[in-house]
Image (cartoon, rainbow, N blue to C red):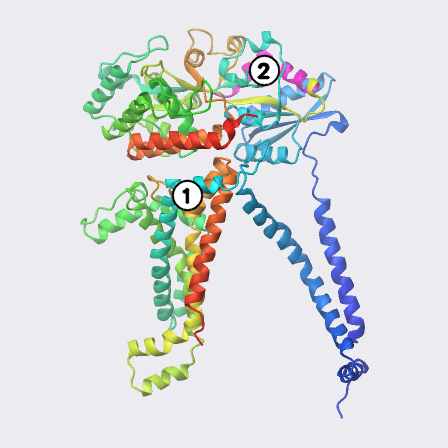
């Protein structure tokens, strides 16, 4: 072949190839996963792909709503692990769906970033809900939940009785001294191996904050000063917080709790390795083996009253939704007691309203599961509702892990409080 | 007379004439250069758009107060860097990273050289051993980390092995929860995983040394150690430089093992610079601060590599 004709041919070929690659890339950009209001349809994003029961209830509600003939709703389910990233990515691309569910601690951050619209729900509807199912930021309601979760001490009645301990109730929880005595007696008896399993085998950051900050709050400390959400000095490293850290480290040093639990602390409890375990309502499904020997107890009162965590997945409307009224209408429809009851029946969660509890077997006053609803009403304290929550939770989780590992507790708390203060200051206290 | 195609003749006459007509020569060259540039352009464009521009933007972010989700970004100058240099966690991470690099670089390259010398012999079974030593390299570091995490448990394989080999003299400890033992445990595992790769590189370097040099050394009556010192070692010069630079860069960017096995603990014994950058950027959502860490890390690695290149330059 003559080199004279080769060159232009090669050039044309390369140019066509390059153009093709570029066009193919542009063509795939828009997959239309955002709110497609063009067809009058609203998109709903949820985090429970893989959670068959919960997704089934959501689909049921959407199907019933669509059957009404008003705006149609389309459900899109994501796996929980990547859900938050998907929402942040969609928000950056300005393609948020109309209706989405959010994890309670992230609601203030998303409201602050302008992702969520304020919910104008009637007060009589909102007033019935458990306080911890409402996502508020700067006194405005941004999300509302169908259910909540609750922490509790699970124990073996036989072990407690042989230790001569009384069984505490929501109205009469253990005091710090009583709890200490129980631990000492169980350890003296020798069996089971572990007196109180804290569940430190789970390395997830959010577990450490959700599970162990209530103890801090029961002592009287907190992650941040809830008066102005500006500083952690004095609450995270004050005397009460240091007392909490000493107690936590003491549990491990005195041999009452293992430094690092097994990967499934509740399974260890059911198999007889521990006398008591710190877990939550989600574990009630695995209690069959214990029979009547398994009891569910509130945490002890360390001075400021017993505390448990609050706030689970809640529902919100995005600020970029073109038909917010339709979305609000759907939310009102979904808050029907019979649907809330469905969530509580199909999963191990606390129903959000008293009416839903009436419709759910086992949740009426005096029935076995009622304990969790009473606990949630009396003791639940939501994690600090501030846009700086991601920083708070990672700093606290790390501090708690270092304390459990045996570091200098006072230094660790001082360091954590200082880091939080510095961070909040550099971010202008997250004021808009 | 050689047979030439009309095109070639034309080109030759063009070339001869080009001695007097320089612009024509340049035009040919220019066309070829253009063709080459066009062929390279898709990859260069992709590289610029998806690598250089994001890296540049990330470095710019280091001077702002951006977070992963934030309504506003504003320039804060050197605020992030002052915070960084006052943060004891950063200095601890830096110390751990350098500790890791200082121990792993000589140990791994030395051990790899030893293995390469061993498998460079022409005896039966060398191929089997070469494959065996290389297998850990092709296993994902994530999988290796998970496996070794189980092996390092207090009642795991490592402690059992130590006990049986030493007749119960050495008890072993809870490797990953012991602040003093966690880093050495991770070093051991990392060296085990990566040594095969560098063994292969040393091997290729060893095989470029002319066998005549060894024969000459034999004639001169050199022993094994002298052969190594005067023939092998100088012959491995270029390989040495390459391995030094690559191991150092890989050691300084230690991340995956920490993320899976210890999460930076216990008590900050295993936190590294890259691990801190990822934790701060993604978990704490402080993207600007994490960008500042990345920028500092980039400058650190650049400096170290440049110093190494300078020290190992051709001294003629």
Q: Nearer the viewer, residue A269 or B221?
A: B221
Q: Magenta region: which residues?
A: A326-348
- Label 1, on which residue? B85
Label 1 crowd bin: few (<14), some (14–19), many (20+), radius 10 Å: few
**Image x and y of residue B268, in percent:** 35, 41
> What is the distance, in whole Å, between disc 1 and disc 2 at their CAs?
54 Å
Q: Nearer the viewer, mark 1 or mark 2?
A: 1
- Label 2, on which residue? A339
**Image x and y of residue A65, in percent:** 68, 18
Q: Is residue A1 visible in this depiction of the protein?
A: no
Label 2 crowd bin: few (<14), some (14–19), many (20+), radius 10 Å: many
**Image x and y of residue B283, in percent:** 48, 36
What residue lies at 46% left-to-right and 32% top-to-bottom?
A423
What residue lies at 30% left-to-right and 44% top-to-bottom?
B175
Q: Nearer the viewer, residue A15 or B276?
A: B276
Q: Is residue A379 left or right of residue A20?
A: left
Quadrant housing residue A71: top right
């Amino acid at each position: 072949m003559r080199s004279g004709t080769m060159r232009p041919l090669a050039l044309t070929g390369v140019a066509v190839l390059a153009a093709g690659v570029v066009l193919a890339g542009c063509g795939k950009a828009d997959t239309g996963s955002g709110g497609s209001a063009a067809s009058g349809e609203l998109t709903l994003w949820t985090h429970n792909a893989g959670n068959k029961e919960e997704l089934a209830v959501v689909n049921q509600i959407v199907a019933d709503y669509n059957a009404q003939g008003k705006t149609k709703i389309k459900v899109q389910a994501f796996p929980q692990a990547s859900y938050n990233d998907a929402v942040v990515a969609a928000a950056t691309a300005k393609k948020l769906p109309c209706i989405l569910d959010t994890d309670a601690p992230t609601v203030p951050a998303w409201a602050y970033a302008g992702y969520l619209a304020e919910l104008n729900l009637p007060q009589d509807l909102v007033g019935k809900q458990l306080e911890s199912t409402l996502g508020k930021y700067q006194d405005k309601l941004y999300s509302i939940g169908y259910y909540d979760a609750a922490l509790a001490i699970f124990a073996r009645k036989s072990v407690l009785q042989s230790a001569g301990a009384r069984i505490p109730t929501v109205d009469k929880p253990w005091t710090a001294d009583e709890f200490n005595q129980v631990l000492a007696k169980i350890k003296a008896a020798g069996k089971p191996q572990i007196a109180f399993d804290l569940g430190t085998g789970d390395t997830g950051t959010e577990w450490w904050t959700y599970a162990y900050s209530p103890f801090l709050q029961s002592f009287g400390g907190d992650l941040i000063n809830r008066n102005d959400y500006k500083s952690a000095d004095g609450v995270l490293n004050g005397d009460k917080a240091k007392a909490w850290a000493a107690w936590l480290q003491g549990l491990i040093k005195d041999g009452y709790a293992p430094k690092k639990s097994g990967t499934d602390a509740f399974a260890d409890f059911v198999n007889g390795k521990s006398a008591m375990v710190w877990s939550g309502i989600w574990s009630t499904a695995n209690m069959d083996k214990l029979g009547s020997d398994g009891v569910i107890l509130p945490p002890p009162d360390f001075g400021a009253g017993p505390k448990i965590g609050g706030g689970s997945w809640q529902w919100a409307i995005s600020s970029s939704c073109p038909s917010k009224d339709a979305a609000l209408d759907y939310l009102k429809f979904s808050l029907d007691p019979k649907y809330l009851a469905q969530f509580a029946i199909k999963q191990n969660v606390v129903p959000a309203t008293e009416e839903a509890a009436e419709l759910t077997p086992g949740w009426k006053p005096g029935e076995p599961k009622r304990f969790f609803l009473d606990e949630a009403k009396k003791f639940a304290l939501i994690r600090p509702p501030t846009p700086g929550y991601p920083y708070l939770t990672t700093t606290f989780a790390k501090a708690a892990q270092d304390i459990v590992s045996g570091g200098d507790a006072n230094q660790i708390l001082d360091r954590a409080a200082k880091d939080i203060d510095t961070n909040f200051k550099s971010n202008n206290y997250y004021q808009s | 007379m050689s047979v030439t195609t009309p095109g070639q003749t034309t080109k030759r006459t063009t070339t001869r004439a080009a001695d007097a007509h320089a612009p024509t020569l340049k035009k040919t060259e220019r066309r070829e250069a253009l063709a080459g540039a066009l062929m390279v352009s898709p990859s260069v464009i992709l590289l610029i758009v998806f690598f250089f521009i994001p890296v540049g933007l990330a470095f710019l972010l280091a001077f702002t107060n951006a977070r992963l989700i934030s309504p506003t970004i504003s320039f804060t100058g050197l605020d992030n860097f002052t915070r960084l240099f006052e943060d004891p966690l950063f200095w601890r991470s830096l110390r751990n990273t350098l500790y890791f690099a200082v121990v792993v670089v000589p140990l791994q390259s030395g051990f790899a050289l030893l293995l390469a010398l061993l498998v460079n012999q022409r005896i039966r079974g060398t191929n089997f051993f070469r494959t065996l030593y290389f297998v850990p390299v092709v296993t994902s570091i994530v999988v290796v980390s998970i496996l070794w995490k189980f092996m390092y448990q207090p009642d795991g394989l490592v402690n059992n092995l130590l006990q049986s080999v030493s007749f119960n003299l050495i008890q072993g400890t809870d490797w990953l929860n012991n602040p003093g033992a966690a880093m050495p445990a991770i070093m051991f595992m990392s060296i085990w995983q990566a040594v095969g790769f560098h063994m292969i590189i040393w091997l290729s370097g060893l095989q470029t040394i002319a066998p005549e040099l060894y024969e000459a050394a034999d004639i001169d009556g050199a022993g094994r150690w002298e052969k190594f010192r005067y023939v092998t070692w100088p012959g491995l010069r270029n390989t040495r430089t390459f391995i030094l630079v690559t191991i150092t860069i890989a050691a300084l960017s230690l991340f995956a093992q920490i993320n899976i096995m210890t999460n930076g603990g216990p008590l900050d014994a295993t936190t590294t610079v890259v691990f801190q950058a990822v934790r701060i950027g993604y978990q704490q959502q402080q993207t600007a601060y994490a960008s500042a860490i990345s920028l500092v890390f980039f400058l650190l690695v650049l400096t170290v590599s440049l110093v190494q290149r300078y020290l190992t330059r051709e001294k003629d």
